[in-house]
Image (spheres, rainbow, N blue to C red):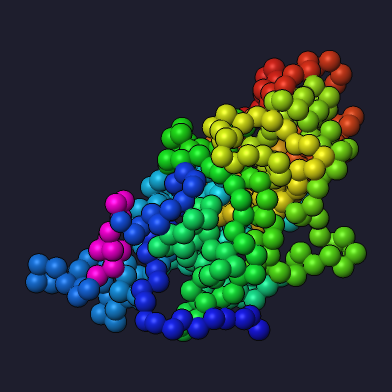
Amino acid sequence: MPVFRSIQFAVITIVIVTLGVAAPAFAFHSGGVAACSGCHTMHASQDGGPAPGWTPGGNPDLLKYGSATDTCLRCHAARGQMAGGSGYGPGGDFHWLTRTFTWTSPSGAAAVSAGSSHGHNVVSGAYGIEPDALLDTAPGGLFLSNRLGCTSCHDPHGNANFRMLYGSELGPAYGDGQRFTFVANAPLAVGTGGTTLAGGGGDETNTRHTVYKSGMSAWCANCHTTMHVNDGSWFTHPAGVALTGSVADNYNRYVSTADLDGGNAATSYSGLVPFEAVAIDLETVDPAHMTTGPTSADQVMCLSCHRAHASPFADAGRWDFRATFLATDSHPRAGDGGASAQDIANRYYGYRFVSGQRSLCNKCHAKDDGDGPEPGRYPSRRGPYPDNPVGP
């Protein structure tokens, strides 16, 4: 069973989560920007009647809205955290949890990409997010799915950690007067500020993105513990370990399936395949202008392949892990049941691919040598925009 620490005092533990603010994070909701009354109510009445959003049985922690996640999204949905798929932040858009896509596979079998498989199902009645339909607990761990919310990861009252993430000093409230124990500290990183809406200044690109330094995979293991156990089987991809020289060299040289050698370390960074730059100085790096690729000592992490919130793809993938060719085979795509034109346009954040682009596993492993279009079709270049590129 998970280890818990009792809460000794009856304190209000839930407020809004600042998911989209720039690092360093402070006690963002404890004054100045937000007030207690923005999220909590003392009497649940206003102008002689019940306060809006209040239920007869009352809300937990005197919240003005139904749950912590309901409350968080009242402000943060429109800033890109649940914005119809147009939230282009590094964590993704919770909108994808409400979208299920269906199609017929090449073999004629029915195929589905269930919304509940697209990310962390932060339970919210107001926004239509249900507990995970398949898993009762976090994969590889014991955190109950029906207790997952924004404040399972972020401290609503603020702390000094990146994105106000909980760490080993204090785990998240877990109900029944208990806290879920986090063993690992919060990761070290610095991000861009402002809204994460497409074109809003905080949207992820190959140049503007969160810069990760260390600790992300260990932090994920607070809930996904056994997925990180090194038993020698290699059934799980290593995480939180050095890339090695050969992988870093592949990453830096790789541009696309059509160009495995045209890149260089100064401009090779891909927003779709981030890594931990272990030697980076977070005080001086500019996350709005960062294009440098990895060194051999830099690390692969969970977020090299997954988004922290949600994506259009199974397992919160940064790309469709099941697609042979990303531009043409990724779902959602035209003709899929449940897919809108906006869903299709937003699925890859505006990143573009050559027509024969294979899985982005190749950014590190370069196993698609010889799989590109006919020789000479695309010249060597250092960007993702070949002649006649295929969009998302």
Q: Residue at x 53, y 59 (%)?
A: 165
Q: Is residue 352 magenta?
A: no
x and y, in percent, of residue 355 in the image: 73, 28
Q: Give the total of numbered labels.
A: 0
Quarter placement of the N terminus: bottom right
> Which x, y percent locates residue 77?
40, 51
Residue nearer the viewer, 126 or 65: 65
Residue in the foreground of this view, choosing between 341 and 261 = 261
Residue 124 is left or right of residue 256, and the answer is: left
Using the rendered view, name the quadrant where residue 135 is placed. Answer: bottom right
Nearest the camera: 299 or 105? 299
Residue 253, located in which quarter of the rendered image? Answer: top right
Instruction: Please tell me which residue is depicted at 48% across the width and 74% down the height of the picture.
Output: 173
Taken as a whole, is the magenta stretch helix, strand or loop?
Answer: loop
Q: What's the residue at 61%, 31% (across, down)?
A: 290
Observer able to see residue 111: no
**In x, y percent, where is residue 120?**
57, 61
- The relative height of residue 20 versus residue 218 in the rendered view (above or below) is above
Q: Is residue 36 magenta?
A: yes
Residue drawn at point x = 57 percent, y = 35 percent = 284
- In the picture, measured across the screen, residue 9 lies left or right of residue 375, that is left
Q: Is residue 300 left or right of residue 286?
A: right
Please say if 301 is above or below 123: above
- The quarter of the picture where residue 351 lies is top right
The region drawn magenta spans 32-41
Front residue of this view, candidates 115 and 223: 223
Q: Confirm whether residue 189 shows in the render.
A: yes
Give the position of the C terminus as an image quadrant. Answer: top right
